[in-house]
Image (cartoon, grey):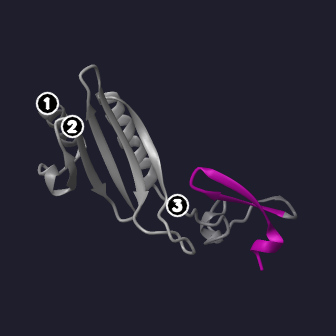
Amino acid sequence: MDKLKVQLVEWFLEFTRFSRIEDFIQIIKDTDEVFIIKLYTKENSYQINIHHHKDRDYLGAGLSARKPIAGEDWTRGRDCSDGKFCKETFDSIIRDIVSAELVKVIKPSEFCNRTDFIEGDKGDRKYKNDRHLKIKIGERTFIADKDLILK
């Protein structure tokens, strides 16, 4: 089991900027057959499990929300990737953790700061026809109803 724990720490050290990974994990269980650690983020906790069996070793994980959703009196959770104890399974668990932590980015409206994004020189409004206006934001071009924009 010690060899599996050392390997797990080495995998963590490959992508973390902290050399003292033990400052960021909580050991929940440490026996000859089972090793369980927890990682915490602002929103979730992640439990990573190693189960040592004589014929094969298992690596798995799960996540639990740290607080309930408004109106609920329990915390939500779900399983993460699991499988044989190998780098592939570990990488899949890390991808699950990153995916769970991503938050949706609110895109700026195509109508904000409209004169700065209108195709052509600033203030040179180019119309598709007399009802529509072409607005370019970054690489994307939007067609908008000029009556809505030019009010």
- Asked whether 146 or 55 is in front, the reply is 55
The quarter of the rendered structure image containing the N terminus is: top left
Q: Which mark is residue 3?
A: 1
Work out whether mark 2 precedes mark 1 in sequence or the reverse, and give the earlier one.
1
Residue 112 figure quarter: bottom right
Please give the name of the residue rendered at 59% of the width and 50% of the height, measured from the top-left corner: 139
Marks 3 and 2 close (CB-CB < 8 Å): no
Picture layout, residue 47 above or below residue 112? above
Majority SS type along the magenta span? strand
Q: Which mark is residue 8?
A: 2
Q: Which residues are magenta?
A: 132-151
- Type of residue at label 2? Leu
Residue sitting farthest toward the top: 55
Q: Position of residue 64 (x, y in %)?
A: 42, 57
SS for tag 2?
A: helix
Please give the name of the residue rendered at 64% of the width and 66% of the height, measured from the top-left corner: 109
Q: Is residue 144 magenta?
A: yes
Work out whether mark 3 precedes mark 2 in sequence or the reverse, and give the earlier one.
2
Please give the name of the residue rendered at 14% of the width and 36% of the height, measured from the top-left corner: 6
- Type of residue at label 1? Lys
User: Left or right of 131: which side holds 55?
Assistant: left
Q: Position of residue 47 (x, y in %)?
A: 33, 49
Task: Give the alpha-carbon distance from disc 3 to disc 2, as whole Å.
Answer: 32 Å
User: Left or right of 10: which side holds 74?
Assistant: right
Q: Which residue is mark 3?
A: 105
Task: Give the alpha-carbon distance from disc 2 to disc 1, as whole Å.
Answer: 9 Å
Task: Give the alpha-carbon distance from disc 1 to disc 3, as whole Å.
Answer: 41 Å
Q: Position of residue 120 (x, y in %)?
A: 65, 59
Picture layout, residue 105 above or below residue 95? below
